[in-house]
Image (cartoon, helix red, strand yellow):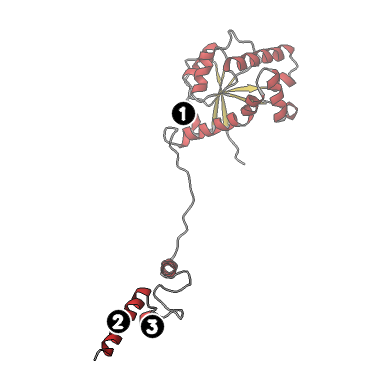
Amino acid sequence: MRILRRCNIFLTDSASNFRIPQLQQHYDLVAARPTDDRTLQQACMSLDVDIISLDLTRRFESHFKFPTLGMAISRGIKIEICYSQGIMSNDPGAKRNLISNATQLIRVTRGRGLIFSSEAKSVLGIRAPSDVINLASVWGLGTERGKDGLTKEARSVVEFARLKRQSFKGIVDIVYGGEKPVETFAHGAKDKQGQKGKANKNQNGKRPGGSLEGTPLHETKVDKPVSKRQQAKNKKAKIQVGGEEKQP
């Protein structure tokens, strides 16, 4: 199990310098929480963060726009929806705002680039994955998209953040592939000799040109088998010799 370190930045002024590159060296994930429309546009367009976490319990000045959120999604930034305030909050206005903002956010983003978190202050505010998927379906998100928000999208934001910090320009990464076993020279020579000896033997386990006893035919006293052509020549020669003997 790997424990990730996350830093949450509250954006209150669009002109502030948040030193995000320095924070990325000490944290695995950097999340930005905009407080108004200007900081939301800044986070989507220019800030190098991993997650944009919105406080959906408050009322925003204007509606969410796809060009703004679509730019963040195309850059690999995920939009976080925290659901515990809609369950545990005692303020009916906060619950109403969360449901309205979550429904609008799902409609504008078309369910892409969303991840779900609890942001719970107690254990009672945490729900099982199946319950979160059902809650998202009530807000208008499909079952497959809801499952991706808990599995695929959440994993992709962690891996994309790791690649940005450890790889070359977020593209090339060095993967440890293990070590090749080292073989000694003696064993390697024996294996080569054994393979060479097997290649020089026929199906009967004998070397080509050898007898059944394993001795080469040219060293044995057994005569080589005579072909039919040679037998015909020998027979013709005997007939000619017999005819010459009969002549006076």
Is the residue under label 3 in contact with that under label 1 (CB below 8 Å)?
no
- The residue tagged with tag 1: helix, strand or loop? helix
Q: Compared to 80, does 228 lie above or below?
A: below
Give the numbered dot on residue 237. Answer: 2
Q: Marks 1/3: CA distance?
A: 90 Å
Q: Marks 1/2: CA distance?
A: 103 Å
Which residue type does callout 3 highlight?
A: Asp
Kindly tell me whether residue 148 is visible in this rendering.
Answer: yes
- The residue tagged with tag 3: helix, strand or loop? loop
Quarter occupied by the C terminus: bottom left
Q: Which is in the foreground here, disc 1 or disc 3?
A: 3
Q: Earlier along the polypeptide chain: callout 1 or callout 2?
A: 1
Q: Which is in the foreground here, disc 2 or disc 3?
A: 2
Residue 38, percent from left and from top: 52, 12
Q: Residue at x 47, y 32 (%)?
A: 164
- The residue tagged with tag 2: helix, strand or loop? helix
Quarter occupied by the N terminus: top right
Q: Which residue is mark 1?
A: 21
Q: Compared to 191, does 88 lie above or below?
A: above
